[in-house]
Image: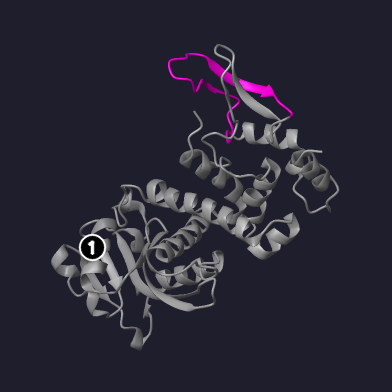
Amino acid sequence: MIRRQQIEQNFQAAQANVLELTRSHDHILTWLADQGLISRMKRCVTENCQGIMSWKRDTSRPDGYIFNCHVCDAKSSIRRNTLFEGSHLSLMELTRIYFHYFLEKVSIKRCSRELHLTQKTVGKLYAKIRSAISSYVTEDLQGDTLLGELPQDSENMDEQDQYPVVEIDESLFSHFTEQGVRTQVWVLGMYDRGSDHCRMFVVPDRTSETLTNLILENVAPDTVIYTDGWAGYNNLRNLGYVHRVVIHARGFGRGLDTTNNIESCWSQIKRLTDYYKGIQGRGPQSMQQIQDRINHGVWLRYVGNSDALDALIQVINSQFIRQ
């Protein structure tokens, strides 16, 4: 019995908490195709061939199907240029990991135990989907837009939204490497009161140069910026911003003169994602992993858990090519 068939039998015999869409291999293939995650047809991969490839049944293949060109008879994996390429796991396992365990924020340890996989295998898949989300946040959600851009209908808005306001703060994030070493990094956070969007960036330090460069790249000119009294923000007035300072020693401010919103974002991001666990090593690699985890939290805050499945499908379809 080939592994694919054995996995299908295992899933059929599993307890009731197994996702319905993974009850059979053919069923999951149909669902993936319906979501656009795997194409049913594509151009032939052979150079100069104008043919179209479509699925052909091939029980010797792990997925049970292969792309076949009707003109030159070329063959190609149905996973080519998709999220699932390069993995030895079945599509049923991968779908369960990406669209159930990861979305439900199930620990790597539990996922590996329930699917009879190594923690290293599950950890790599979690990191892969988290990296795709992070790229989507940077390229699509943030893109070329700036925080603090004036609303078009400002005359009919509440007083606090009639002018662009961005709250900015830095926070010290602690995390543990796989070896149990506790490490800390600084993260710069920005919150736009008008759009309710936030951005967060892992930074090497809190110097004025580091902070102001990120602010210039992400906040529109003439924006009212609220910060604490950290000296790294002292040059904002000279850069074209209206800078207002909230002294935390006297409280977090009142009314509109506050940084409470960005403070709330910190706790939301820490609650939404496991940013602090299982970071591998130190240096640039670990910095990127932390950024990916924080962007994952920013994404969850943006889409809401109720829409996370559809939003994740949108992320994958934007990040992976299926020609």
Q: Is residue 26 left or right of residue 316?
A: right
Q: Is residue 255 magenta?
A: no
185, above or below 148, in the image: below
Residue ID for mark 1: 213
- In this view of the protein, which residue sits in the foreground, 160 or 149? 149
66, above or below 219, in the image: above
269, above or below 13, in the image: below
Q: Is residue 46 magenta?
A: yes
Residue 176 appears in the picture as rendered: yes
174, above or below 65, in the image: below
Residue 156 x/y as whole percent: 35, 52
Q: Residue 282 lies in what quarter of the image?
A: bottom left
Label 1: how many Cα within 10 Å (few below 14, some 14–19, many 20+) = few
The quadrant the N terminus occupies is top right
Q: Is residue 234 left or right of residue 250?
A: left
The type of residue carrying mark 1 is: Asn
Label 1 residue SS: helix
- In this view of the protein, which residue sits in the foreground, 93 or 62? 62
Residue 255 appears in the picture as rendered: no
At a point 46% along the width and 59% down the height, the residue shown is 292
Residue 20 x/y as whole percent: 76, 44
Q: Is residue 48 left or right of residue 241?
A: right
Q: Residue furthest right?
A: 13
In this picture, which residue range is highlighted in magenta? 36-59
At a point 74% along the width and 43% down the height, the residue shown is 22
Q: Main secondary structure of the magenta part?
A: loop
- In this view of the protein, which residue sits in the foreground, 159 or 223? 223
